[in-house]
């Protein structure tokens, strides 16, 4: 498509221009940083030269006061000013590469040391006018050298400041140009996207549908180009995601061995059924059966875990065959099962428990090496829901009835409101 090629070429050219501008900005940034450092050094030099000159002047005044008064306090003051001047001279020495002319700096450094030596000789010597006057005159020459260096430093600082401002202006102009190019590229991309990628809006609508949980949604496909392939890929991805989601959901609520609901989901469903019963939706009542396979541990230890797993699956199959489609069977844990019986009275639940117990007689399990194991029995405890009970209370009643059934010799049904077994369903 010519328009598409034109757009792409334009974008490539502008991106190249932008890249060149970015490199130029980086270079100018480094240059400005270097110039800023130089200006800082120049400022430090100017301050150091001024401070050196002032400290030397104060040193001279203190020396003259000592000459007039012979008060040694002025000598102590003079030494303090001399030390300050020495510190400033050392600071200038660390920046000597930026001082110009270099011969003037060398002369200043040398004469400043001679000045300090002259003061020291005068203090230690006869302290005559003829010995101090050369020292005083030398200070005037030092001041002149400081002014010369300061003047040259000011000229260099002014030049570097102008360079800095020029570089800053160029950077701003280049930045504005780059911003304009970015805006131009953005307009081109937006126009191209609007013209060529209009179906993206359809995909976004589908994404919102999926976010709301509608994983069955499929996009209509009415084009055979790359966008059509994208839409097909999106539909395949949605189907695969929906399949994995359903699979994970099923795995999270079912027992891997039996395919029944696990205990966590059983409790969720029980709470739902209790709420329905409280609102009068379970007009026929609500009952709960807890089932335990008798002597399961002994068989499992004697004949192996594979045999035990097969017994659990056979028992689950037989129990499920006796239940209605509206009943809920779950694996409570280990060799225990639990059944929720909606719209079931206490008497109906007891009769159903009897049928379940009797159905175990038909179970025969291959124990290996030509042996078969029969005589599988179960103990059942039951309870009927009463207003005011919680789910935990309901489970506790059924579990207590199951305990009573096991304590009474197993292979029987016990109810939470009865201490007499309904029957013994031994084979």
Image (cartoon, grey):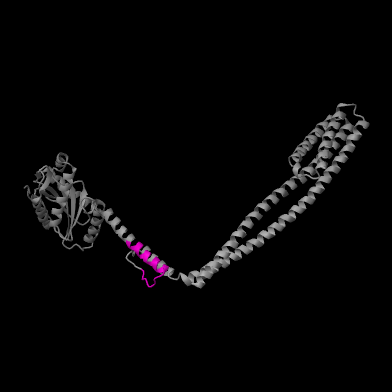
**Extreme residue toward the left, this view:** 427
Q: Is residue 130 visible?
A: yes
174 or 262, which lies in front?
174
**49 with respect to 290 (left or right):** right
Magenta highlight range = 219-239
**Extreme residue toward the top, this view:** 125
**383 with respect to 44 (left or right):** left
Magenta stretch secondary structure, dominant: helix
- Counting from the top left corner in percent of width and height, residue 211 is at 38, 63
Residue 233 colored in magenta in the image = yes
20 or 391, which lies in front?
20
Instruction: Please determine whether, in this image, residue 103 is positioned above or below residue 264.
Output: above
- Counting from the top left corner in percent of width and height, residue 103 is at 82, 41
Residue 137 colored in magenta in the image = no
**Residue drawn at the location 81% of the way across and 38% of the way down:** 109
Q: Quadrant of residue 184?
A: bottom right
14 or 352, which lies in front?
14
Total numbered circles: 0
- Counting from the top left corner in percent of width and height, residue 117 is at 84, 31
């Amino acid at each position: 498509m010519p328009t598409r090629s034109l757009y792409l070429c334009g974008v490539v050219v502008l991106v190249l221009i932008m890249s060149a501008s970015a490199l130029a900005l980086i270079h100018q940034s480094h240059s400005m940083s270097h110039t800023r450092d130089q200006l800082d050094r120049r400022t430090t030099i100017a301050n150091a030269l001024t401070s050196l000159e002032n400290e030397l002047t104060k040193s001279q005044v203190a020396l003259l006061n000592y000459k007039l008064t012979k008060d040694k306090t002025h000598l102590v003051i003079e030494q303090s000013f001399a030390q300050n001047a020495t510190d400033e001279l050392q600071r200038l020495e660390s920046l000597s590469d930026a001082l110009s002319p270099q011969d003037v700096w060398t002369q200043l450094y040398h004469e400043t040391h001679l000045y300090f030596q002259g003061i020291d000789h005068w203090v230690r010597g006869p302290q005559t006018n003829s010995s101090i006057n050369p020292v005083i005159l030398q200070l005037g020459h030092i001041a002149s050298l400081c002014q010369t260096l300061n003047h040259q430093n000011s000229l260099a600082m002014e030049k570097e400041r102008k360079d800095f401002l020029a570089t800053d202006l160029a950077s701003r102009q280049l930045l504005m140009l780059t911003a304009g190019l970015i805006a131009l590229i953005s307009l081109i991309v937006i126009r191209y996207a609007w013209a060529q990628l209009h179906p993206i809006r359809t995909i976004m609508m589908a994404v919102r549908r999926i976010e709301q949980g509608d994983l069955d949604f499929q996009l209509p496909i009415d084009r055979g180009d790359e966008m059509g392939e994208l839409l097909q890929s999106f539909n395949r991805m949605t189907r695969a995601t929906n399949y994995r989601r359903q699979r994970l959901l099923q795995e999270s609520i079912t027992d891997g061995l039996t395919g029944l609901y696990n205990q966590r989901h059983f409790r969720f469903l029980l709470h739902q059924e209790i709420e329905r019963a409280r609102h009068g939706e379970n007009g026929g009542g609500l009952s709960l059966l807890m089932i335990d396979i008798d002597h399961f541990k002994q068989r499992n230890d004697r004949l192996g875990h594979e045999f035990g797993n097969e017994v659990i699956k056979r028992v689950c199959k037989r129990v499920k065959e006796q239940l209605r489609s509206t009943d809920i069977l779950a694996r409570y844990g280990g060799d225990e099962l639990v059944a929720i019986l909606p719209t079931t009275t206490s008497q109906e639940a007891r009769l159903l428990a009897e049928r379940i117990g009797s159905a175990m007689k038909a179970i025969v399990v291959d124990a290996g090496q030509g042996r078969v194991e029969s005589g599988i029995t179960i103990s059942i405890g039951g309870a009927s829901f009463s207003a005011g009970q919680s789910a935990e209370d309901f489970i506790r009643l059924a579990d207590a009835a199951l305990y009573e059934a096991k304590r009474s010799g197993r292979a029987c049904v016990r109810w939470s409101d009865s201490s007499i077994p309904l029957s013994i369903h031994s084979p």
